[in-house]
């Protein structure tokens, strides 16, 4: 059997089509089961050259038969890193929510583009309702939102809208509409996408001004105020401030109310990058971390992180309605005709600088339906409970682990593993330097063993340390106990 035996080339192909799709689904289901099986490895690591040798990746001239394609499907997953494995703590997006996966499968079957109501009526309405729900949770009364491909693009949309609001002529006249060099402000620990936005928007990375942070990685409001005044004195034109709710490494939450006061004072756009931390808004116990978010002009919030929605799912919300469309609309006649037989406000495609938009709403909507607001609140509280358990465990073994931050604010937990030979060495720069060398070696051993994955990086004056992320409902206390023992098993003699 080959592709021609399937629908639509074979209109009698119902049976083989069903059989083929079922067998692919079986491969996927088996993968899902392995993902949650703690006896199975997270990965079977190969160097790129080795992996090229074991995989058949060539594009053939002649059709391959369907049995071979099923083997290809199996092979594709055989060497894939199981990002939903309970011991995969490597990224801000961990886990595999089964309902969301079902949503992604349905999305693929529907295979539509999210630019017009004409071809995605149900999904556009879902996006409408779900985004309004998120804006309400943020604390916006009205406003507008859109799903974008990732937090970086969401942040870019915020900055574009802010510039448009301040200089509406920019759209037609470009740089000539500006009275001087625009600059934006974001903390030193914020996501690198703000710098990317400054570069992409023609501001230049020098005009992405980084505000110092305190010992916990939170923006220092007085420094923000000082830098704004300093840039004005230099003749620059500040227009945008980004506060981060959940920094990538430390998980710090900038003080939103204080930043809001400064934005109000200087009449600047106030954006909150809550790509990572936004999930705290779903919990009564945690949302105080983002107190003041309702005062913002825009919020980035990625459901594919703390909320566990499948990759990718990123949202950007605006307090003011109408800005997105006014900023980005190009009125392509062949797509966004104004005389369509329905309310063309539902044609969302012209609100963005992309043309096509992937359907990222269904897997979010379905997951939210399955849990309800109540389920998501429990989901967040559980992640924090597991994090607290990990922090206590690490602190109780202070001979083997040294915390980088004593009291993490989010589910990022940063620490150094201390191998045996360094346990008795006295504190100081030499010991820190050696610790910084040990962590990548331990990461290499983790990947070879395939039993655990945790990310590492340096930050500020701190040499390489592990950043453990708990962002999956699959993680339980036994996994945390295992992690601690496994780090010691793999790293003891380093
Ligand atoms: O920018 C980042 C985005 C993601 C993610 O979408 O999961 C950084 C990270 O993850 C990360 O894990 O540091």
Image: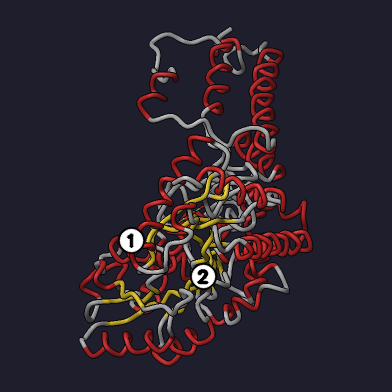
Q: Is residue 207 left or right of residue 146?
A: left
Which residue is located at x 47 percent, y 62 percent? 249
In front of the other: 424 or 329: 424
Drawn side of residue 236 relative to residue 10, left or right = left
Q: From this viewpoint, is residue 366 visible? A: no
Q: Is residue 199 left or right of residue 36?
A: left
Q: Horizontal and vertical percent for residue 45?
A: 47, 32
The residue drawn where x is 52% and y is 54% is 339
Task: Determine whether the residue tagged by mark 2 lies in a helix, strand or loop.
Answer: loop
Mark 1, residue position? 196
Tell me, for residue 405, which label it has, or none.
2
Helix, strand or loop under label 1? helix
Q: Residue 144, image x and y in percent? A: 56, 68
Quarter holding the N terminus is top right
Is residue 75 in view?
yes
Q: Position of residue 282 (x, y in %)?
A: 69, 67
């Amino acid at each position: 059997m080959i592709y021609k035996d399937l629908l639509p080339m074979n209109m009698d192909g119902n049976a083989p089509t069903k059989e083929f799709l079922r067998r692919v689904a079986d491969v996927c289901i088996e993968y899902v089961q392995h993902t949650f099986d703690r006896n199975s490895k997270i990965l079977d690591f190969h160097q790129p050259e080795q992996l090229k040798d074991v995989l058949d990746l060539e594009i053939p001239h002649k059709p391959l038969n369907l049995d071979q394609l099923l083997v290809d499907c199996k092979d594709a997953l055989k060497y894939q890193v199981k990002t939903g494995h309970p011991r995969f703590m490597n990224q801000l997006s961990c886990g595999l929510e089964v309902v969301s996966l079902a949503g992604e499968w349905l999305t693929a079957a529907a295979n539509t583009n999210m630019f017009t109501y004409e071809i995605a009526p149900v999904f556009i309405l879902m996006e409408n309702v779900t985004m309004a729900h998120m804006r309400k949770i943020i604390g916006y009364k009205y406003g507008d939102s859109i799903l974008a491909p990732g937090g970086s693009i969401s942040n870019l949309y915020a900055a574009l809208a802010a510039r448009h609001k301040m200089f509406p002529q920019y759209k037609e006249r470009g740089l000539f509409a500006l009275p001087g060099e625009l600059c934006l402000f974001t903390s030193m620990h914020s996501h690198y996408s703000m710098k990317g936005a400054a570069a992409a928007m023609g501001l230049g990375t020098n005009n992405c001004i980084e505000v110092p942070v305190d010992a916990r990685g939170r923006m220092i409001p007085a420094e923000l105020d000082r830098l704004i005044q300093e840039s004005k004195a230099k003749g620059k034109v500040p227009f945008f401030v980004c506060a981060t709710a959940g920094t990538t490494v430390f998980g710090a939450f900038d003080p939103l109310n204080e930043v809001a006061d400064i934005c109000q004072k200087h009449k600047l756009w106030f954006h909150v990058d809550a790509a990572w931390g936004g999930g705290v808004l779903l919990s009564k116990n945690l949302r105080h971390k983002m107190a003041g978010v309702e005062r913002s002009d825009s919020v980035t919030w990625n459901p594919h992180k703390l909320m566990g929605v499948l990759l990718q799912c990123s949202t950007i919300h605006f307090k003011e309605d109408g800005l997105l469309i006014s900023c980005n609309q190009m009125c392509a006649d062949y797509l966004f005709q104004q005389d369509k037989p329905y309310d063309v406000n539902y044609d969302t495609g012209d609100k963005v600088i992309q043309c096509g938009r992937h359907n990222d709403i269904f897997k979010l909507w379905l997951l939210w339906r399955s849990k309800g607001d109540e389920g998501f609140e429990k989901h967040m509280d559980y992640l924090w409970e597991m994090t607290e358990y990990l922090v206590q465990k690490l602190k109780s073994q202070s001979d083997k682990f040294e915390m980088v931050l004593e009291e993490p604010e989010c589910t990022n937990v940063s620490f150094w593993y201390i191998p045996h030979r360094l346990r008795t060495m006295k504190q100081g720069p030499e010991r820190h330097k050696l610790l910084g060398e040990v962590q990548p070696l331990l990461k290499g051993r983790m990947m070879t063993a395939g039993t655990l994955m945790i990310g590492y990086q340096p930050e500020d004056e701190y040499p390489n340390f592990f950043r453990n992320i708990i962002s999956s409902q699959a993680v339980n206390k036994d996994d945390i106990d295992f992690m601690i023992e496994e780090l010691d098993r793999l790293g003891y003699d380093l």
